[in-house]
Image: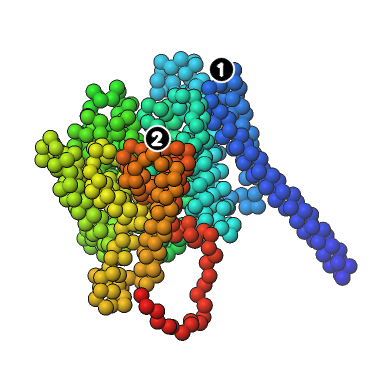
Amino acid sequence: MSKLLSRFKKERGGQNRSFEKWESYGDFLYRAFRILRAVLAALAGISMVAEYGFNLEPAYSEAGNLLRIYILNIYFILSMLQIVTAKNIPEYIKLRKGESLLLLFIGAYLLFPDLASGIALSLNPNLTPVAVTNVYLVASQVFLLLALVFNWVRLSSRLTNFRIHPPALLMFSFFFLILLGSLMLSLPKATHAAGMDFLDALFTSASAVCVTGLVVVDTGSYFTFTGQLIILFLIQLGGLGIMTLTTFISVIVGNTAQLKEYATLRDMLDEESTGKIRQTVLIIVLMTLIIETIGAISIYYSVDLAYLSGRKDKIYFAIFHSVSAFCNAGFSLDPKGLTSAYLVSNNVLLFTVMALIVLGGLGFPVMSNIGRAINPFSRRGLIRRRLSLHSKIVIVSTVVLLVSGFVLIYILETKHSFVGMDFADQFVASLFQSVTLRTAGFNTVDFSVLTEPTLFIMVLYMWIGASPGSTGGGIKTTTFTVAMLNLISLGRGRRYVELWGREIPQVAVIKSFATIILSVFFIAMAIFALMLAEPDKEFIPLLFEVISAFSTVGLTTGVTASLSPAGKSIIIIMMFLGRIGLLTFLFTFLRLKSEGKYRFSEENIII
C-alpha cells in the first residue's frame, strides 16, 4: 500500500511539474504575442502617418494600403493567440470587453471581405468599383485606428504602475502631447506650404494643447484640412487632459482601471474620494460633449450659407469654433477671427461663444457638482443637494469679474475705440471682451487700438484667469478670492478665513499666496527675458503678451507673429507653465515629505 501511495505521489508530482512547465511556456507566449501586437500597432501608426502626412507616389500609397491589410490580418491572429494563451480566458475577455468586441468585428470583416462592400452598396447603389475598394481600405484603417486607441489606453494605464509622482505625470503628459503635435504639424500634408518650421510648429502645438490661442500663422489659410484637424484634436485633448480621456475610454469599452490610476486622477482633478473618480470622469466628458454639441448646433444655424461655401463647411466651422470656445482655446478659421465684418455683427454666434467660454471657464469640479446637485427628474425636487463652498466661490467670483470687467471696458472705451458704435454694439463689445478675459482668446475688436488703461485692466483680469479644474489658465478665481478674504480677515484681526458659515483650510490660504508669489516671479522673469530678446518692442505689448501666454488667454496686441525665435521660445515656456500650473511644476521637482510628529516652539518675527 505504501509503495502504491509513493508511486501515486511521484506521478502526481511529475504532472504538476509538467503543468507548471507548460504554464511558464504559456506565459512566455502570452507576453510575446502582446509585444508583437504592440509592434504591429506601431507599424500601423507609422503607415497611416505616411499616408496622411506625406505626398506619396501612387505606387507607394497602394503598397501602404496592402501593408495595412496584412497588418490587420496578423494583428487579428496574434490577438486570438493571446486570448488562447491567457491563464483565464473568460476573465481575460471580461476585463477587455471593448477590445474583444473589436476583435469580433475585425474577424467578421476579414472572414467576409465583401461585407463592407455590401453595406456600402446598400447605402449607395451607384458606387463605382474604385469607390467600393476605397470603402474596404477605409474600413481597414478604421479598425487599425481603433486598435491603436486600445494600445494607447493600455500603455497609459501601465504608466501609473510606475512610481511617478502625479504632478510629474501630468507635466510629462502635456509635454509629450505638445511634442507629438509639433511633429504632426510639421508634416508636408499639414500645411499648404508643404512643411512648417519646427519652432513655429512647436509654438502652434503648445498653443493648442495649452488651449491658449496665440498663433504665428493664420490657422484657416496656412493649414490644410488635415492640419486643422490635428489642431482641433490637440485642443480637445489638451482641454480635457490625456489621463481624463484615457480613463473615460477605459470605462466606456469595459476595461477596468487600476487603483493607482484612480489615485493619480484624484490628485489631478482635486477629487475628495477615489471611489468618485469613475463617476467624475464620466460627468466631465459627457457634459463636455453635450455642451460642445449644443454650441455647435447653435453656431451652425447662426451662420449664413453666404458666409461659407456649403453645408459641410458650416458643420466643420460650427464644430471647430464650439470646441475652441468651450476649451477656451481661441483658435478661429477666419483670418480676422471674430473681428470679421460678418461674424462681429452676428449676435447669436457671439452670445453662443460667450456662453461656451463661461461654461468652460467654470471648471470641471463645478460642472460635476452642479450635475450632481441638480436633477430635474428627482422626486425630491430640482435641487437634490447643496452646492459646495468651492462651487459657490467660483460662481460668485466669475459673475463679479464679468460684470466689473464689462463696466470698466465700457467706461474706458466708449469715447475711444467704441466711437461710432450704437449702444447695443458697445454693450455687446464690452461684454464680449470681459468674457474673453476668462482666458478664451477670442476678440471682436482690434486690441492694438485700445487705450493703455484698458490694456492694463485687461492684464489684471487675464492674470486672475478662469477657475481651477477648467480649460482656462491664470492664478484662478479661487486663488484671488481666498487671498482677498485673508486680507479682510487680517484687517479684522481674525486668524482664520471664514465664508458662508464655513472655514477655509489654512493649507488653501497658503497655496493661494504661494501661487500668487510664484506667478509674479515667473512673469517678471519672462518679461525681463522678453525685453532682452525683443529690444525694438514697447513694454505694454510685451507685458500683455506674457500675461496672455501665462494665463493661456491667447489675446495679443499684434506682436506674436513678429517675435524672434528667442521670444517665441519664452512664450512657449509661459504657455506650458500656465497650463500645468506653477504648483504642479514646483511639486514635480520637490520631494514631498510627510509632516513630522513633532513641532518646534514658536518665536515671533516682525511683519
**Residue 341 badge:** none
Q: Can residue 166 be seen?
A: no
User: Of all residues shown, which one is farthest toward the front?
Assistant: 535
Residue at the image position 44 percent from the left and 60 percent from the top: 583
User: Of all residues shown, which one is farthest toward the right?
Assistant: 3
Residue at the image position 37 percent from the left and 65 percent from the top: 513
Locate residue 433 relative to residue 562 in the image: left or right: left
Q: Callout 2 environment at 10 Å: few (<14), some (14 to 19), or many (20+)?
A: few
Query: Which quadrant of the figure has residue 500?
Result: bottom left
Sequence-first tag of 1 and 2: 1
| Inter-mark Cα distance, 1 to 2 | 40 Å
Disc 2 marks which residue? 562
* 512 is higher (above) or lower (below) than 451: below
Residue at the image position 51 percent from the left and 58 percent from the top: 588
Disc 1 marks which residue? 58
Give, as a three-letter code, the residue at label 1.
Answer: Pro
Q: SS at mark 2? A: loop
Quadrant including the N terminus = bottom right
Mark 1 touching mark 2, by CB under 8 A?
A: no
Q: SS at mark 1? A: helix
